[in-house]
Amino acid sequence: MNYSLEELHAIFKKRICTLEILNAAVCDIREAMEDIQTPTELSTRFYLTANLALIITNRDYFSELVDIGNRIVQMNVSDKSNMEAYYGLHILYTCIGFTPKVVEYGLKVIDSPEKNKDLLLSVYTSLAIICKETGLTDKAIEYTEMGCKMGAGAEEQYSLKVRLVSANNIAMIYLDSGRIEEAVESRNELVKLMEEHPDNPEVAPLYPMIWFSVLLVDAHGTNKDSAIEQYVRIMDNLMTGIKKQTIARQTLQPHITFLNRLLDAGRVDDMLRIAEYIRENPSSFFGNRTMLYKAMIDAYNKKNITDEAYHKLLMSYIEELEHYREEQEAVISLLIVEQYRIREVDNRYDVIRKKFEDDSLTHCLNRQSFHLNGQEYADQNTAGSLIFIDLDNLKKTNDRFGHNAGDRLLIEFVRCVNRVKPDAVLFYRYAGDEFILLTPLGIDEAEAFVAHITEECNKVSGRAGEELRLEFSYGIAAFREGQKAIGDVVDLADKRMYECKKRHHMMKGCPEFLHFAQIAPERMA
């Protein structure tokens, strides 16, 4: 081992990392995976190593660490120590940009039996951002408030901190969701709180971040010009070394907003000057840099600049796009491998699943299976139809010949259907003597399919006599008639089946009556 866990903690705490340190840490974690003594330490080591990769913003290690993290999670299934492994994967996928995995591992952190307040607060913030970016503003606010409650205490100053952080995050959520009036309300609440508590040492460190948020809201409202002017002044102070403090909200997104505002206002030189500073300080401004390059290219175009610097910028833009593409392809490959692993696990349970979906008497699919996959089938075969079938003689057969004969009637009917059923048709025993067929066929084709079933039933009835009179009534409904709800299609086909059955009973009073299975009822309107 190059570093003990304590030494790794110390490196992380100091936030000082080099490529050599990161490489050694990755080697250490590979070695630890070969000889697991304490799963908690392995999970913690992974979490710290993932953070070191973020500290030096070395994306070359992200995909490899994602693979390592997933293997650690598989090795420590159900272990409470997995929380840090989940969080490590959560932040890695956040940097790579795979939102579904960010959400998946974020929720696993929340559900972990072990609770780490700092990690949970970070996860709630990440989930809030994702919800905000997908238009789920109310859910984003909910996650923000949940995160703030993590630190709620009895002390007045701590309650003030929670109120400030919550109002700040909610202001940004409203702003990024385009709800400007609500963002302004939260902005005014922030200003009021800061003015009421100007000298509170507990919250004073938050004020630069909060003032930057206020400035960002103003840049979208009526104070647009003054907000832009103030932003330029802040950045000038930072670039000239007048103020050394870190600029708040150092993700690229808010700065891109200001840069585009400067561009719209015609302040191209100011925009390029600030953009170059951000570009030259990648460790201070996190995020996808393609948007920064795009804004700079727009600025060059406005000034009609096509010199060597412009071409270098274009190359940087293309390289950045390519880097993200390669990174995403690498992670996609890892996800495909994970899918194969999941599939292998699923195959072990195929027998159990088949038993769960199998009708024990007839061995066609059961009603539970229909509820599981019926809607999906209809959605994938929108031009198809559902056939609802009810056997006419089951009760009479049971009463006259016994239940064994009734069971045989059901089994023989299923055999008849299976002899003519195309592979694309799903066949369910819906209830005692009721059956459903899901087909990709239109109604006319479904009628022809029912006629084939009738012919098979006639053959069996002719050989077996009264004991196996395979007569049935049926109704057909197109999937599109259910307005996308499979339950509506079932109800409609069931109704048509009963109309068919009424005609069947009427025909039995006629001297020329033929077995109902021998004729195809006219199609219901």
Image (cartoon, grey):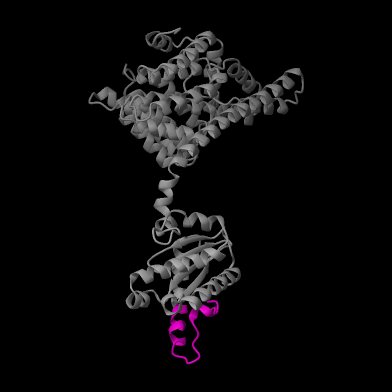
Residue at the (54%, 78%) spot, across then down: 520
Where are the magenta residues, as a range? 499-525
Place of residue 308 in the rendered image (x, y in percent of width and height, measured from the top left): 76, 18
In percent of width and height, residue 205 lies at 38, 17
Q: Quadrant of residue 268?
A: top right
Q: Nearer the viewer, residue 209 or 109?
A: 109
Query: Residue 336 is drawn in which quadrant?
Result: top right
Q: Position of residue 236 (x, y in %)?
A: 56, 15
Q: Is residue 386 left or right of residue 303?
A: left
Say above or below: 250 vs 415. Answer: above
Give left or right: position of 134 versus 291.
left
**Looking at the image, which residue is at 56% across and 20% down?**
59
Residue 24 image point, x, y percent: 50, 10
Is 123 drawn above or below residue 44 in the view shown?
below
The N terminus sits in image quarter:
top left
- Foreground: 183 or 66? 66
In the rendered image, is residue 261 in sight? no
Q: Is residue 41 left or right of residue 135?
A: left
Residue 433 appearing in the image:
yes
Q: Residue furthest bottom?
A: 511
